Image: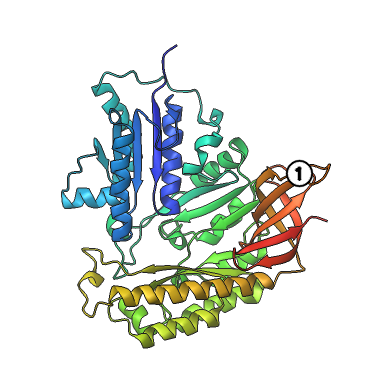
């Protein structure tokens, strides 16, 4: 029996990259390749890279080197944003046999097959249909979670925030046509069995602009899919959130009440220097509009520290505003100068130690905010989407199991049960307690 050629994928960065890796894996499996975990020896090794910060770019190259060490005789393919920057800068990477930028990522599988032919290795025969493919447990975690699937509906950004390299690595905004999104969502739900879909894009709120449609139109259409239990939204830009989108999220039961709205700074002067296109008051009004119709909504956000010229006063304004908004959780990161962006040449750099200290203070604040939010729901009944189920240690003569899953507003709840519960089930639980040190929520099925 002829050996199947193998491939592995390492994915860095955003949900858009995770979706892209999933698509690459599907196409390669449709060609007859077999996926193995990253780090195992493989015929094809793909590194889907990130370049949002210089740390992410350096990590991408480190993973590329690791890929070569793991598969010295294999084809090593470097793609994603760091690959795009390497091509633009004319930088050759010794560990990569093939560098494919984001614009050419859709042709990556064909390029791989060309490389295979050049080395006279047999290209596996195509399988009959993609719907026959099922994600295998031992590798699915690299490109997808087990109960939720990322669905990229939009690519590119034209906002050109002064610190951001993404418009240069991802190009201008373009949306996936409505019917194509619906068909892909149906495949994920009906063929692959994912009960939850996470809509993602480089600038998700721009979806449909070129078709005269909005994200609200897309949500209404996806809500009609039988078998789809939840729709979760990835990062939203506050400048593009309107009343119709807010009302649609409130009216459609399948839409999760968790909204990641990127803030970056809570100081108007810094927001202007970042080129964000909104101020504190505009951001506050968006959150208040959501809360009027979705009282249990959870808000998470991105906060950057150490932007050039950020003073202690600017930072204190951010702390005050973050408390005022009452985010559930913060994603905190330090400013990283990206060559080619306006902010890379700005004066008054913030010393690294100062940026680190500010990041630490925000991380501690994030823990406080999470605890305050979670405690609101103690004693309430919630629905969790079961994403983990495992046998617990023996409890007398009875077998017991541990169950965990997310509420619609992004609280991870852990429960104990004596019954077998399938992954992907919507399970009613009562929140009975919160453990602040580990950031855990406990529920009762009784």
| Residue 102 appearing in the image | no
Which of the two residues, 277 or 11, is positioned nearer the viewer here?
A: 11
Disc 1: which residue: 394
Where does the image place residue 6, in percent across and percent down from the top left?
Answer: 40, 27
Q: Is residue 266 positioned above or below 395 on the image?
A: below
> Of helix, strand and loop, which one carries label 1?
loop
Q: Residue furthest top?
A: 1
Q: Is residue 263 positioned above or below 74 on the image?
A: below
Which of the two residues, 256 or 1, is positioned nearer the viewer here?
A: 1
- Left or right side of 123 for 22: right
Quarter of the C terminus within the rendering: bottom right
Quarter of the N terminus within the rendering: top left
- Left or right side of 247 for 41: left
Q: Is residue 144 positioned above or below 359 on the image?
A: above
Where does the image place residue 273, in percent across and percent down from the top left?
Answer: 30, 79
The image shows a total of numbered marks equal to 1
- Left or right side of 50 for 346: left
Residue 441 occupies quadrant: bottom right
Where does the image place residue 255, in percent across and percent down from the top left?
Answer: 62, 59
Q: Is residue 99 positioned above or below 50 on the image?
A: above
| Residue 159 appearing in the image | yes
Where does the image place residue 378, in percent across and percent down from the top left?
Answer: 73, 69
- Left or right side of 384 for 1: left
Q: What colouring does the structure picture have?
A: rainbow
Q: Which residue does the image show at 82% across and 45% down from the upper left?
A: 396
Q: Which residue does the image show at 35% across and 84% down from the upper left?
A: 269
Which of the two residues, 322 or 388, is positioned nearer the viewer here?
A: 388
Which of the two residues, 174 or 62, is positioned nearer the viewer here?
A: 62
Q: Which residue does the image show at 50% across and 48% down from the upper left?
A: 151
């Amino acid at each position: 029996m002829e050996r199947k050629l193998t491939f592995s994928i390492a994915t860095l960065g955003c949900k858009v990259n995770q979706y892209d890796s999933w698509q690459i894996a599907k196409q390669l499996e449709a060609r007859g390749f077999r996926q193995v975990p990253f780090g195992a020896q493989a015929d094809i090794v793909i590194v889907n890279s990130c370049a949002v910060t210089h740390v992410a770019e350096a990590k991408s190259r480190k993973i590329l080197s690791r890929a070569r060490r793991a598969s010295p005789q294999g084809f090593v393919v470097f793609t994603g944003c760091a690959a795009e920057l390497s091509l633009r800068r004319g930088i050759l990477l010794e560990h990569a046999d093939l560098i494919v930028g984001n614009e050419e990522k859709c042709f990556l599988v064909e390029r791989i097959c060309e490389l295979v032919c050049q080395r006279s290795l047999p290209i596996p025969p195509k399988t009959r249909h993609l719907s026959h493919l099922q994600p295998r447990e031992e590798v699915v975690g690299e490109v997808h979670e087990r109960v939720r699937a990322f669905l990229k509906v939009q690519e590119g950004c034209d906002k050109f925030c002064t610190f951001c390299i993404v418009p240069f690595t991802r190009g201008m905004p373009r949306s996936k046509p409505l019917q194509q999104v619906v068909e892909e969502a149906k495949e994920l739900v009906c063929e692959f069995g994912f009960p939850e879909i996470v809509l993602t894009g480089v600038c998700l709120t721009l979806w449909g602009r070129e078709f005269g449609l909005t994200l609200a139109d897309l949500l209404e259409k996806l809500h009609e899919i039988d078998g789809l239990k939840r729709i979760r939204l990835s990062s939203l830009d506050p400048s593009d959130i309107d009343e119709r989108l807010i009302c649609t999220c409130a009216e459609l039961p399948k839409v999760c009440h968790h909204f990641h709205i990127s803030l970056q700074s809570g100081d108007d002067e810094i927001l202007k220097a970042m080129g964000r296109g909104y101020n504190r008051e505009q951001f506050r009004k968006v959150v208040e509009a959501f809360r009027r119709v979705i009282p249990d909504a959870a808000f998470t956000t991105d906060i950057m520290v150490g932007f050039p010229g950020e003073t202690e006063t600017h930072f204190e304004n951010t702390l005050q505003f973050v408390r005022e908004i009452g985010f559930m959780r913060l994603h905190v990161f330090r400013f990283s100068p990206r060559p080619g962006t306006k902010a890379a040449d700005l004066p008054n750099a913030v010393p690294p130690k100062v940026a680190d200290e500010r990041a630490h203070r925000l991380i501690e604040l994030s823990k406080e905010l999470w605890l305050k939010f979670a405690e609101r729901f103690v004693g309430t009944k919630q629905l969790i989407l079961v994403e983990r189920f495992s046998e617990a240690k023996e409890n007398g003569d009875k077998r017991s199991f541990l169950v965990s899953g997310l509420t619609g507003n992004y609280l991870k709840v852990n429960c104990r049960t004596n019954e077998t519960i399938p992954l992907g089930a919507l399970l009613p639980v009562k929140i009975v307690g919160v453990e602040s040190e580990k950031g855990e929520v406990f529920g009762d099925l009784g």
